[in-house]
Structures are given as C-alpha cells and as structure tokens.
Amino acid sequence: MKAVRKAGDRLAKPMLFGPDITAGQYVDALEIFSIANSWRASHFLPMRSVQFSVGHHMRALRLKGDMASRPKRMESIRRKLRESTTNLDTMNDIGGCRAIMPDIKSVRSLLESMRDNFPHEIHPREFDYIDEPKPDGYRSHHIVFQYRPRAADTEAFEGRRIELQVRTTLQHSWATAVEAVGLFRRQDLKHGKGEQDWLRFFQLMSAEFARIEQCPVHIGAPDHNDRIRELRDIDRRIGATSILEDIKNITLYSANFAQTTGNIDTTWSNTAKIIV
C-alpha cells in the first residue's frame, strides 16, 4: 500500500515525457504508471460486484431504473490527486457505479434498503447532495462501499472502495447537460471553469429542477420568480435553450450518444417549459 500511495504522490506532480528525458526518468515513470494502473484495475471486480448487488436490491423492491459502472480514467485520477488532499490508496471513486431512478421516492427507497442489508461494508460518511446540493447546483446521493470478499480467490480485493451515485432521471439529465455543453463549447463547466453566464444558468436550472422534485435548493439561490427572470435574461444573452436544442439534434444522429440524447432532450424540454 505504501507503493500505491507513493505512486499517487508522484502522479499528482508534473511528469516529464518525450525524447529529452533520461533512461532513469523513463524507467521511473513506467514503474509509477504500472503501479497506478494495477491499483486501478484491482477495482474492476469489486465494482462489478457492487453493481450486481445494487441491481439485486432494485429488482427485489420492483424499482425501475438504470444501472451503469465504469472505472475512473487515469487523467481524472491525476486531476483529483492534484486538486484535493485525497491519496491514491484511499480514493473513493476509482471504481464508480450509478443508479438512475425515475423519482425521489425510488432514490430514498433504494438507499434505505441498501443501508438495511448489503453484502459490502458501507462507509460511515455519505454525501447527500440531494438534500444539501453543491453550490454549483450538482445534486445526487453518493454512498461508498468497501468490498467484502466471499471467497478465497477474491480476498486480494478486500477493502477496495467503490462509490455509488444514486440520482433521479432529472438530476442525471442536468449533470449530462453540463458535460455536453462543456464539451460543445470547449469549457470545463463540470469543474466550475468557463463562461459565468453558463455556470449561473445551470446553477439556476438546478434550483428549478429541485423545486419540481420538491427538494431543497442550494444555499443562496434566489426565489422562484427571481430565478425565472434571471434565467430569461441569461437565455437572451447566450441562447441557452437554442444551444441545448442544437446539441439534442446533433446527438440524435450519433449512436455513441444514444443515452446522452435522451438526457439532453429531458433537460432541453424542461428548460424550455420553465423559461417560456
């Protein structure tokens, strides 16, 4: 584990690449990435196990919803190591799962069921961004599991942390729209970097979506009438609804964005209704 932490410390710092590096630097970089990639790969089996167990709870409760899982990209791991105090060996979301539920009631039912009985240990600290949204408007419930092996051949993976995000379709559509617009406009809106009008637009839309779901809005959000007025002003300046519609239409023709299309459509249609 010390080797993993040491590799993480190195990954958080700038690393030299290219023809000008020495043989020693090349070997050093190769070893660092080898350790980090092996650690990342060791989360695959626990991640699939958590996904299967969450799906089992959904079926037992007869809840509709979608499940997905994927490991964190090395680029994202390095960003998190640079921008936070977390260490590679204690990072919660190297393996990530997501449950997208139709409504708030389903979200809360699933969470309650998992807390009552789950094959993997639940980390004591949960991150409830539904009842306490992030300042930028992000809403989802994050819960972290630590893998418990059931057989001798999986004991090597004991304790691997897997993060599960449980959110509604509307919350997921908002998060997907933030990423899609950021990609479309080449701005890192997801991490709070980009045009202030776009960041403010999504912040206000999150509060309106929370109002639809009868959930708390983020601290400092203006009241409903003021939000609508400000949203209309921003839309006139940047053409937000038109851009969301353009992205929706573009993704209609891309098989790679089949899932995203539905999410963007949900965001665009709800946004259009609210602003108009």
Image (cartoon, rainbow, N blue to C red):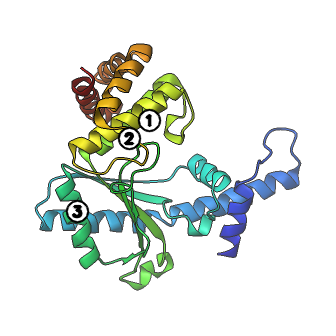
Instruction: Indicate the position of residue 10 as horizontal and vertical percent values.
Output: 74, 58
Instruction: Indicate the position of residue 192 as horizontal and vertical percent values.
Output: 54, 38
In the figure, residue 205 lies in which quadrant? top left
Q: Earlier in the sequence, mark 2 or mark 3?
A: 3
Q: Amino acid at mark 2?
A: Ala
| CB atoms of marks 2 and 1 within 8 Å | yes
Question: Is residue 111 something one can see in this rendering?
Answer: yes
Q: Residue at x 24, y 27 (%)?
A: 274
The answer to which of 173 and 161 lies nearer the viewer is: 173
Q: Secondary structure at mark 1?
A: helix
Q: Secondary structure at mark 2?
A: helix
Please state if 50 lies on the left or on the right of 88 as rendered. Answer: left
Work out how far the residue at label 2 is from the one at label 1, CA to CA, in angstroms.
7 Å
Q: Which residue is mark 2?
A: 175
Q: Quadrant of the N terminus?
A: bottom right
Q: Amino acid at mark 1?
A: Glu
Q: Which mark is residue 135?
A: none
